[in-house]
Image (cartoon, rainbow, N blue to C red):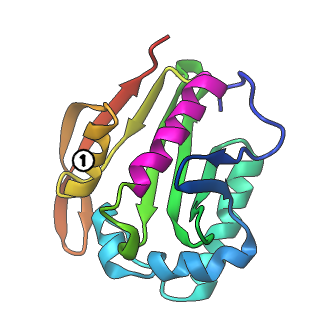
């Protein structure tokens, strides 16, 4: 992770409609609801969680990687009622290059409402302004039209396609490489 102003406490981020906060064990059932959804997980080439225990194991690994300084993972909640809408991460940090990767997933009922673009904009701002990143990357499957559209809206530029890079459910998928550079 970049060393510039890394917060000692997990950063809470706010926007007009969402609150991005640290994930807690009590969030496991809400997270399982979308991580077990075949339609949500197929868009990024991962099998869904089959049991709540899968989600608890994933949360444990996520917490360990945060404690090692390897990532930030925020729970995306709605300001109106605290409902869990999804997750967003900055991970795969390369401190020497001041670079990190962006990842996100959104429960089906909250898709196509601008929630993730609002949340992602706050995470990007945090990455550049607080962590001192120079570059944020995202690597969606090319068939994930919603993710590609989100990245373009946020100003990410397509840098290339890795053809048939991801093997998932008996087929090969192309993976796109997008990046956004800091202005400073």
The residue to which callout 1 is attached is 148
Considering every residue shown, the one lying at the far top of the view is: 184
Q: For residue 27, what is the image quadrant? A: bottom right
| Residue 131 visible, this angle | no
Whole-percent x, y for residue 115 in the image: 42, 56
Whole-percent x, y for residue 124 in the image: 50, 35
Whole-percent x, y for residue 122 in the image: 53, 40
* Badge 1: residue crowd in 10 Å (few <14, some 14–19, many ≥20): many
Whole-percent x, y for residue 57 in the image: 65, 75
Instruction: Please state which of residues 100 and 110 is positioned toward the viewer in this rendering.
Output: 110
Q: Residue at x 34, y 36 (%)?
A: 154
Q: For residue 32, what is the image quadrant? A: bottom right
Question: In the rendered image, which quarter contains the N terminus?
Answer: top right
Q: Residue at x 30, y 71 (%)?
A: 42
| Residue 27 visible, this angle | yes
Type of secondary structure dominating the magenta stretch: helix
């Amino acid at each position: 992770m970049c060393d510039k102003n890394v917060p000692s406490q997990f950063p809470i981020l706010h926007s007009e409609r969402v609150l991005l906060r640290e994930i807690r064990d009590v969030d496991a059932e809400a997270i399982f609801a979308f991580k077990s959804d075949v339609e949500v997980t197929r868009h990024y080439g991962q099998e869904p969680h089959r049991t709540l225990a899968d989600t608890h194991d994933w949360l444990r690994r996520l917490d360990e990687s945060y404690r090692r300084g390897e990532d930030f993972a925020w729970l995306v909640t709605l300001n109106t009622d605290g409902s869990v809408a999804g997750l967003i991460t900055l991970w795969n940090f390369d401190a020497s290059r001041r670079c990190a990767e962006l990842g996100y997933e959104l429960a089906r009922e909250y898709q196509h409402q601008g929630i993730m673009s609002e949340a992602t904009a706050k995470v990007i701002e945090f990455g550049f302004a607080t962590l001192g990143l120079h570059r944020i990357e995202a690597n969606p499957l090319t068939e994930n039209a919603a993710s590609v559209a989100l990245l373009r809206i946020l100003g990410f530029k397509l840098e290339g396609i890795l053809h048939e890079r991801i093997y998932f459910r008996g087929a090969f998928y192309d993976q796109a490489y997008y990046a956004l550079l800091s202005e400073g």
